Image: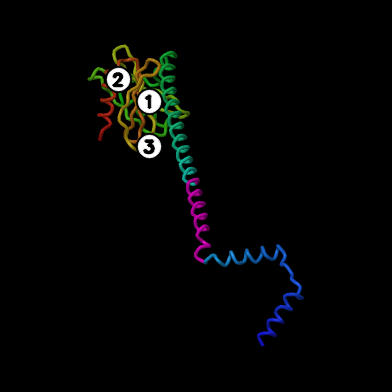
Amino acid sequence: MDQHEDELSALIKGKARRYQAPAELRSLIKASLDTERLSDADIPRPRRRTLSASWAQWMNLGLAFACGIAVSVVAVYFVRTGGEEERLVQGVVASHVRSLMASHVVDVESSDKHTVKPWFTGKVDFSPPVKDFAAEGISLVGGRLDYIGERAVVALVYRFGQHTINVFIWPSTSGSPRDPQFTVHQGFNVARWTSHQMQFWAISDVNVRELQTLVRLLVQADAP
């Protein structure tokens, strides 16, 4: 049997035709074998890393965008606030100078608060506090109707020696009180404060100590 098997094997090797597999088939088989070598645990790892990197990138972009929006809002707020403050100051200074140049300091001339305060009834939509401080050397001259920031305001006029002091009053848009602040604009001393939902501006060419005296008297008189 062994002799016949050897003879048959030799005959097959000598007579049988050999066929070589195409290159495309070899490539497909190799790719299939390479894929099978990868375990299920190995496949999602690079995908998880890719997703994590993408998520982190989007988070960074979102954070940067949010920070940009926040900075823009704050910048706009301060620009608008600063612009409004400047317009009010310019309006106060212009009204003070205009009253002196036009020799129209008062509409109602009186040192009696019971005469000055009722005069504004129906002319403005609020009731201004009117006080006289003649005993302290600062006398009430009277009052007039004026316009600042496109609205009607009360102007109380005081006299300190030869100096005229205008005190402008109108309702405050902020309910919180604000302590007096003193600044200088175009050579005039200016004071601003908020009390009892009213906004006060005092302006004059008196020195700052004299203006502080009037402001202190007004704040004390307006205190409950």
Residue 21 position within the rendered picture, expressed as x and y whole percent measured from the top left:
71, 67
Instruction: Judge depth for marks 3 and 1 and give the one in front.
Output: 3
Calculate the distance from the C-alpha at mark 2 to the C-alpha at mark 1. 14 Å
Q: Secondary structure at mark 3?
A: loop
- Residue 164 lies in quadrant: top left
Dominant secondary structure of the residues highlighted in magenta in the image: helix
Q: Which residue is mark 3?
A: 174
- Residue at 39% x, 28% y is 120
**Front position in the image: 90 or 131:** 90
Dot 2, how many residues are within 10 Å of its Cα: few (below 14), some (14-19), or many (20+)?
A: many
Q: Are the residues flagged by discs 3 and 1 in contact, CB closer than 8 Å?
A: no
Q: Which residue is mark 1?
A: 168
Q: In the orientation shown, which residue stands out farthest toward the bottom?
A: 1
As drawn, 200 above or below 25: above
Left or right, 21 with reference to 73: right
- Residue at 29% x, 24% y is 215
As drawn, 86 above or below 75: above
**Front position in the image: 174 or 54:** 54
Q: Which residue is mark 2?
A: 211
- Residue 152 lies in quadrant: top left
Left or right, 190 with reference to 4: left
Q: In the orientation shown, which residue stands out farthest toward the left?
A: 135
- Mark 1 residue type: Phe
Dot 1, how many residues are within 10 Å of its Cα: few (below 14), some (14-19), or many (20+)?
A: many
- Mark 3 residue type: Ser
Is residue 145 one of those drawn in magenta? no
Residue 207 position within the rendered picture, expressed as x and y whole percent measured from the top left:
30, 15
Residue 39 position within the rendered picture, expressed as x and y whole percent measured from the top left:
52, 66
Is residue 58 one of those drawn in magenta? yes
Calculate the distance from the C-alpha at mark 3 to the C-alpha at mark 1. 17 Å
Q: Which residues are magenta?
A: 40-61
